[in-house]
Image: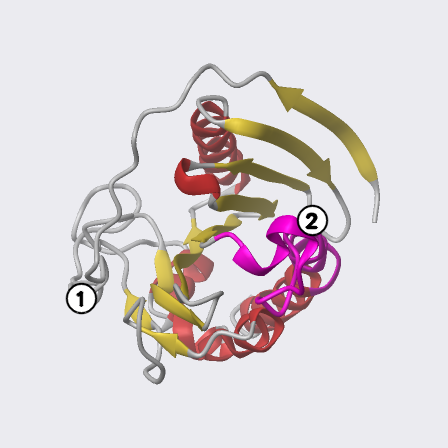
Amino acid sequence: MKRILFKTFAATGAAALLLSGCSLFQGGTDTGGNSNGDDGGSDNAVYTEMASWDACEVLGNLQPITDEMGIQGYGSSTSAGGDPSTAKIGNTWDPESIGCNDLIYLGPNEGVGGSGEIKVKIVPTENEEQATAAYDDRVSGAEAESAQWEQAKSEEFGDPWDAGTIVSWTGDTSQPFVQVIARDGQWVFHIDLYYTQDYGLRGGGEPALAFTTDELNQWFVDTYLPEVNQIVNDRIAEVQ
């Protein structure tokens, strides 16, 4: 995997982050217009096909991420069970994307429980120019957010993607945050994740989570994203 650029942003202070105890994705199946802002569909066959997908079905209900992170539950920050929620084009939280998302429960974490939230999004567009603009906007947004917090880092990656960036930082109550954004042709892939810090590591103790932050971020770039790239492009090839 090519490494092109690594840069660290100086933290500029932190505002308190209020965490909700209920899922943001209960209305995730709302539908609306396409990425051009109208309700009439698109003449582009690839866009039309991708916009019709169920992201959770395409992404295997996030099973690879579930296994890697040891996620025990979706839809709640305190209990096991459940599945991630599907969001369609026109949804209220990211209308240009289809998504597979929800609150997550990571199991016991030194008596407080591990939790977080994951949003995994596929962003179809009409052409490479639109995809490049969407990619640039999402990277800029992630980097601007990270710059407000501590330990902000942004690293670019390449093959098999036309462009890719992973942005990470430490947020309120020392929670790890990461956004992974990549573009291939006329579509963009975007992971947006935060989770409780591993309290087991404080004072040199045994880890409570199934992964470290660095290991997870590297796995996203080196293993998970190439797999997603292949899955999505195989489906696109069927309509080209």
Residue at 32 percent across and 25 percent down: it is 15
Q: Quadrant of residue 73?
A: bottom left
| Residue type, numbered disc 2 | Trp
| Residue type, numbered disc 1 | Gln
Residue 162 percent location from the top left of the image? 68, 43
For mark 2, give the secondary structure.
loop
Sooner in the amino-acid sequence: mark 1 or mark 2: 1
Query: What secondary structure prevails in the magenta region?
Result: helix
Which stretch appears magenta? Answer: 197-223
Figure quadrant of the C terminus: bottom right
Residue at 29 percent across and 31 percent down: it is 16
Mark 1 residue crowding within 10 angstroms, few (<14) / some (14–19) / many (20+) = some
Q: Is residue 89 above or below residue 151?
A: below
Give the side of residue 62 with respect to residue 201, left or right: left
The residue that disc 1 covers is 26
Q: In which quarter of the image is residue 207?
A: bottom right
The residue that disc 2 covers is 161
Q: In which quarter of the image is residue 99?
A: bottom left
Q: How many marks?
A: 2
Residue 153 percent location from the top left of the image? 63, 31
Q: Does the magenta stretch include residue 41?
A: no
Q: Which of 96 and 66 is in front in this view?
A: 66
Residue at 48 percent across and 74 percent down: it is 71
